[in-house]
Amino acid sequence: MAIELPALPFEATALEPYISANTLSFHHGKHHQAYVTNTNNLIKGTDLENASLEAIIAASTNNPEKAGLFNNSAQVWNHTFYWNGMKKGGGGVPSGAIASKITEDFGSFDAFVEAFKNAGMTQFGSGWAWLVLEGGKLKVTKTANGDTPMAHGQKALLTVDVWEHAYYLDYQNKRADYIDIFLKHLVNWDFVNANLTA
Ligand code: MN3
């Protein structure tokens, strides 16, 4: 049972003008697909051949001999999670359980926005900024390369991909603009609320 590339949860043009169909075509069709292909090549003929994606990630976490498998399988998971965290007409101030939880744990929505932007901007090189739940509290974190919250005992609620391939075609080197637009126009807070209460 090979790992499969999930379809995007929206039309390729759904996030325009903020993220172009061209970016999504490369990011989903080439980058995300490559992580799927690499993962399948690495599990072929091993005891992980029929394992779920989460089990593959767990089996390769903190395992130097399986570092390649960890990076590729975690990148499959991170990208699917990133797509689901965006929607047409998203972004802005949330409602529901996440809204009060953000106020409770960060003091205000603006404080969360500042922390999330800061995490995305200070991630040196390729990686991700995250909103996670750890020990019942919300926390903003960043990870390098393919690293992912589940490898650190955290529950992921939202992520933004800050690898250059995520924004370079639309924003060139302006990572700050991309993260700002992500928060203002793209975040799928319904998905974040569902993750929080799951
Ligand atoms: Mn990416």
Image (cartoon, grey):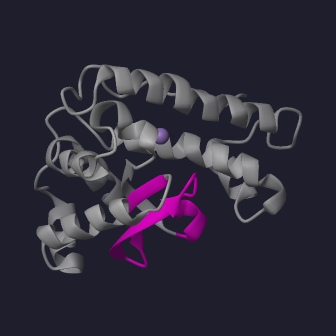
Assess whether residue 140 is covered by the magenta stretch. Answer: yes
Name the quadrant containing residue 131: bottom left
Name the quadrant containing residue 76: top right
Residue 157: x %, y % from top left: 36, 57
Relative to the observer, which residue lies in front, 46 or 27? 27
Specify whether 108 is left or right of 166.
left
Name the quadrant containing residue 109: bottom left
User: Residue visible at 55% across and 61% down?
Assistant: 150
Outermost residue toward the right? 45
Residue 137: x %, y % from top left: 34, 77
| Quarter of the rendering occupied by the C terminus | bottom left
Residue 196: x %, y % from top left: 32, 60
Q: Is residue 103 above or below residue 119?
A: below
| Quarter of the rendering occupied by the N terminus | top right
Q: Is residue 83 visible?
A: no
Relative to the observer, which residue lies in front, 69 or 7? 69
Assess whether residue 80 is covered by the magenta stretch. Answer: no
Q: Is residue 111 above or below residue 46?
A: below
Total number of numbered discs in the rendering: 0
Q: Is residue 67 visible?
A: yes
Residue 54: x %, y % from top left: 62, 49
User: Residue visible at 35% across and 30% down?
Assistant: 169
Specify whether 134 is left or right of 118.
right
User: Residue visible at 65% across and 43% down?
Assistant: 72
Specify whether 100 is left or right of 21.
left
Residue extent of the magenta highlight: 127-153
Relative to the observer, which residue lies in front, 18 or 63? 18
